[in-house]
Amino acid sequence: MKKILTLTILVLLSVTARAQYIDGVPQSLERRAGHLYTDDGTRLSQAAAMSLLSEDMYGMYSSGRHLYKAGVIVCSIGGVLEAAGITILAITITQLNSSKTPAPLFAGMVLCAPFVVIGKSLLIASIPLFCIANAWLKKAAEGYSPRTAYVPQLSLGAQPSGIGLGIRF
């Protein structure tokens, strides 16, 4: 009877110790494509990030997200302008092949040059935006520490007050 009671107490203590864990709280975060992801691969929403991260880390995450979005917009506009400039140049080269005068080529180069220059400038300007955004998102992910309850330790043997079963909370 005494063995069954001891076994029952140990089982109950282990169940109680397991109840101290908070399920659903990720143990780590990682940065991918301008977002933070949990260790099981789900993307954090703004509300989830606000509840999980500290105030400083959330500010860094929010700023990083805004910079990343700005980088995507600047890079997209630069790419479209660059493609438009190259398309204008390609059209003028085909026009040059149909007419034997160099006037369309010169006009095409003059017309495509601003598109290409502005497009390249925007593409280059988007690089620091992406770098800073990724650095801030990475710092926010590395600065995350899960808020879990302290796990009690169960030990059997020598204790500070004698020999026996001890639980440290």
Image (cartoon, rainbow, N blue to C red):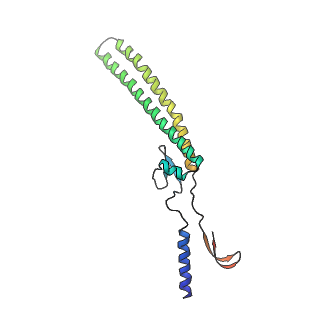
User: Residue, x 33% and y 21% (percent of image)?
Assistant: 91
The answer to whether one can see residue 102 in this image is no
* The one of 56 and 98 positioned closer to us in this rendering: 56
User: Residue, x 48% and y 29% (percent of image)?
Assistant: 122
Q: Quadrant of the N terminus?
A: bottom right
List x then y, in percent, for residue 37.
Answer: 48, 50
Does 73 sit left or right of 10 as displayed?
left
Q: Residue furthest bottom?
A: 1
Q: Residue furthest left?
A: 98
List x then y, in percent, for residue 156.
Answer: 63, 77
Does 162 sit left or right of 5 as displayed?
right
* The one of 70 and 114 positioned closer to us in this rendering: 70
User: Residue, x 50% and y 30% (percent of image)?
Assistant: 124
* The one of 11 and 81 positioned closer to us in this rendering: 11
Q: Quadrant of the C terminus?
A: bottom right
The relative height of residue 38 versus residue 95 in the rendered view (above or below) is below
User: Residue, x 50% and y 39% (percent of image)?
Assistant: 68
List x then y, in percent, for residue 166.
Answer: 64, 75
The answer to whether one can see residue 31 in this image is yes
Q: How many marks?
A: 0
The relative height of residue 75 versus residue 42 in the rendered view (above or below) is above
Does 92 sit left or right of 165 as displayed?
left
The relative height of residue 64 versus residue 126 in the rendered view (above or below) is below
